[in-house]
Amino acid sequence: MSDAEALIELRRVSKHFVSTDHHEDIVVLDDINFSLRPGEIVAMLGRSGCGKSTLLRIICGLTPASTGQVLYRGQPVTRPVAGVSMVFQTFGLFPWLTVLENVELGLEAQGILMAERRKRALAVIDLIGLDGFESAYPKELSGGMRQRVGFARALVVNPDVLLMDEAFSALDVPTSETLRGDLLDLWLERQIPTRAILMVSHSIEEVLMIADRIVILDNNPGRVKAELPITLKHPRDHTAPGFRRLVERIYEIMTATAGEPQASGISHRLPSAHVAQLLGVLDEINHPTHQGRADLPALADALELAVNDLLPLIEALQLLDFAQVAGGDIRLSLHGQAFLDADIQRRKMIFGEHLLRRVPLAGHICRVIDERPNQRAPENRFLGELEDQLSEDEAERVLQVIIDWGRYAELFAYDYDTGVFSAENPGE
Amino acid sequence: MRNPFPSPAILAGLRLPNRWDILLLPLVFGGLFLLAWGGHRMAVPYAFGEQLPISLDPSVLPEYALRTTLRMGIALLCSLLFTFIYAKLAVSSRRAEQILIPLLDILQSVPVLGFLSITVLWFVHLFPGSLLGPECAAIFAIFTSQAWNMAFSFYYSLRMLPKELYQVANLFQLSAWQRFWKLELPYAMPGLVWNTMMSVSGGWFFVVASEAITISDQTVLLPGIGSYIAVAIDHRDLTAVGYAILAMLAVILITDQLLFRPLVAWADKFKFEFAESQEPPQSWFLELLRRARLPRMVLALPVWLWERLRPFAPRRPTFRLPLPKLRDWRRVDPWLDYLWMVLLSGAAVASIVSLTRFVLTEADDAEVAHVFLLGLYTLVRVVILTALASLIWIPIGIWIGLRPRLAQRVQPLALFLSAFPANLLFPVVVSFIALHQLNPEIWLSPLMILGTQWYILFNVIAGAAALPSDLKEAAANLGLQGWLRWRRVLLPAVFPSYLTGGLTASGGAWNASVVAEVANWGSTTLVASGIGAYIAQQTIQGDHPRVALGIAVMSLYVVLFNRLFWKRLYAFAQRRLALD
């Protein structure tokens, strides 16, 4: 199919934010090229913070791209367009409107008369399995029913393109499976006029169940890392060998890094991982069923973690040199084994050594505290340094991670009230 | 409240008015008639300086009460309109926000009766020969007691509105008009209703105070409860004072039952929460409105007409407001920012210079210093009284708040008491002081906090009632008792909500000082030295530069006191004591 037929086309789309104090750019999305063609469901897969939700908002005209262009049917998108509709992760329902009124909202905005509005809304409500709930307020509904309202509201305007921003991730597993299945049936039976669906997700199994094509996004900055056509026939079976192979393949792509994983400098975006979680993962790898070398999908299953939650932990283990990842498998390193075998006090020591050796920010904080005559340093100093390269929120998150790790390793103390790092422990 | 009447389901098919309508009709028509009549009486011919006869006969009180309420209602409508426009402007652009929000902060600190002293003559000139002039001045004063607080509430709601809902609205291309009615106003509704209620509570005080104005030695008495009581004071008539108090109680009770309770119960559906509330507020009047068919038909009429007329109108309504275009807010030209700051600073300097010049036409440096000293006296009073009220009401409030059944009963009572204009009680206290020749410097002071202390009680009860039961149980389990329990559990838990009450109470006390530091009983005048008394006395003499000086100094004190004391405590509470 040629690009001229594409419903949505992205041409070299980038998005950057200006950092708070300096005029340096923080790149969120970098040079994204992509097209969505009629008749396909495409899934964008990426870790949290890779800018995939921002990308959806650029596509539907809610946020402008910094550079590059988004085309809808060949026309540049500069504001929300009627043919593109979206389903939100946290539903985005108006709690003061009933189900019917919520669904009618988009039609009302188009100036459609009451009688017609009602007819169309009721038809969609019927289709999506909400009949009987027309007069209910969203707060009376369960999560799954709420998201059905979200779908009904998005579909009632007869969109060409339906965008789904993590539409199932706020729901529990059985609910999301049912809803996903229902949606897929409507799509396959052509009961909805939608011509293409673009979904964003962080769940590998979810996208493999419905997508015809998967786009994997890298993070820091968000880039297209790989594209994977999925040719499995519906209905798909998540235990089938072909399915499992794809899961492993995707894990492999998502964890593949260029060369040795190493912190890039003091403003390296440290993954959000608590020490207790890291120990849990190490424990599981060391478990007799895995014997120090675990298959990532199997590890995720055993720990009951979504890939989105597992990947930061894996990254942290690699960063601290406690484990290595290759070909979709994770292996305990010698240091990792030693860390796991040690007692509580010894673990703290090992963790501290690795922190100083592998995470430049930890060493930097210790050095600054040391150089100060009173052995104290305010957090604003470090936040300022981080904000040169990171957004304000991200800088705060990274500092929070290092505080957690540093406290565990007893490298430094941190006082919440005053926001001061110091060498000694309080009360000593 | 459980509805005692049987369900009207049997009547569901009928389009005819039902029995609820029969109950409602007289209420509605009665209300309309009273509105028309009261409105007519407001515009009667009047020459400034003329004395309108105020009768002390209790039979005129219903009329006076109506006219007082009407003033309040008009002021409230103006406040709402102001709130919408001001808050929307403030969120429309960063530059507007930079100036409008601090301005609101300052306006809030200006004593309400100060606005009255400054504007009354201007309004009289605006409507020569009509009572509308003084009426407008009074209404404006009430407006200034309500509008700032409501505008703040609406502004905060707009700022807090979840980004996702805005995105939904944009995605489905709601026009700015639709967005306001479907999204912004509903989201802000619970906060706005609550603040309106608080504003009206505070407003009664100023209605009463602004009806009897003495300016340039001319006394204007607008027919109303405030004037009634002023005349009663002149005649040393305690019985009449009692009648006025009863009339006011009735007015507050009626507005509470017919306006605010229904509003609060109705606004509950706009709460932005996806869990069903435990005990939604109830109102019999709202129930009546919901069951009657007439209101629904009246409300449906404009929609019905609109839908009928639409086919004849052009396909796309031409008045559709433009959709917001995509803009990157982060890209701001720093030069424009500098220019804006220079412009603002220039305007600020110019106004300081002109105000100083205006003040110095009358007062000299020594007097300015003296006014600052007077401000200090009032500050001391406010601090001591707020502390005393806190000392009394915090323990009582906690005690009540920990008993849910009791709290449910006392909370509306505290709210009710806070609505009662304390200045109606002044004559009772003042006659006592005059009789026993007590020192006014001390004994007039409690009047300042009389009306606003309830905010402390009210908020402390709310804070204690919201204390999570697992904290209470943990404290009991650890055997925390006595002072330790108060210090480690109860006081920190109610502190954040106490601050809201304390700030309101102390703000109210500053405002009340203008009325409370000078008091009359017949021909006896009691004066406590303070900046409130200064403003009141200069207003009577019509000395505008001195009034301006007094107001400016008091505003300065209030702003500084709030910044240096309350705001800091707020920051502390937010950091340390927030229960997430």
Image: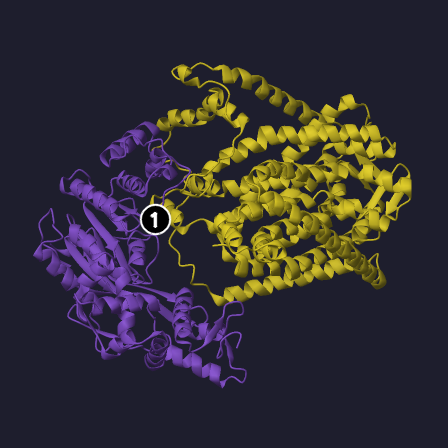
Chain colours: A purple, B yellow
Q: Nearer the viewer, residue B113 or A304?
A: A304
Horizontally, residue B279 falls left or right of residue B120, namely left
* x 38%, y 35%: residue: A137
Whole-percent x, y for residue B419 in the image:
67, 38
Label 1: how many residues lie within 10 Å, few (<14), some (14-19) or many (20+)?
Answer: some
Callout 1: chain: A
In terms of image quadrants, where is residue B177?
A: top left
Q: Quadrant of residue A191?
A: top left
The location of residue A407, given as percent across then percent down, is 42, 73
In this rendered view, identify the residue nearer to me: B549 or B206: B206
Tell me if I can see residue B223 in this picture. no
Observer able to see residue A418? yes
- Relative vertical location of residue B88 with respect to residue B8 in this rendering, above or below: below
Tell me: A413 left or right of B405.
Answer: left
Q: Position of residue A272 (x, y in %)?
A: 34, 66
Circle count: 1
Please, what is the three-letter code of the amino acid marked with disc 1? Thr
**Which secondary structure, mark 1?**
loop
User: Observer-nearest residue: A274 or A33?
Assistant: A274
Q: Mark 1 — residue?
A: A90
Relative vertical location of residue A217 with respect to residue A326 in this rendering, above or below: above
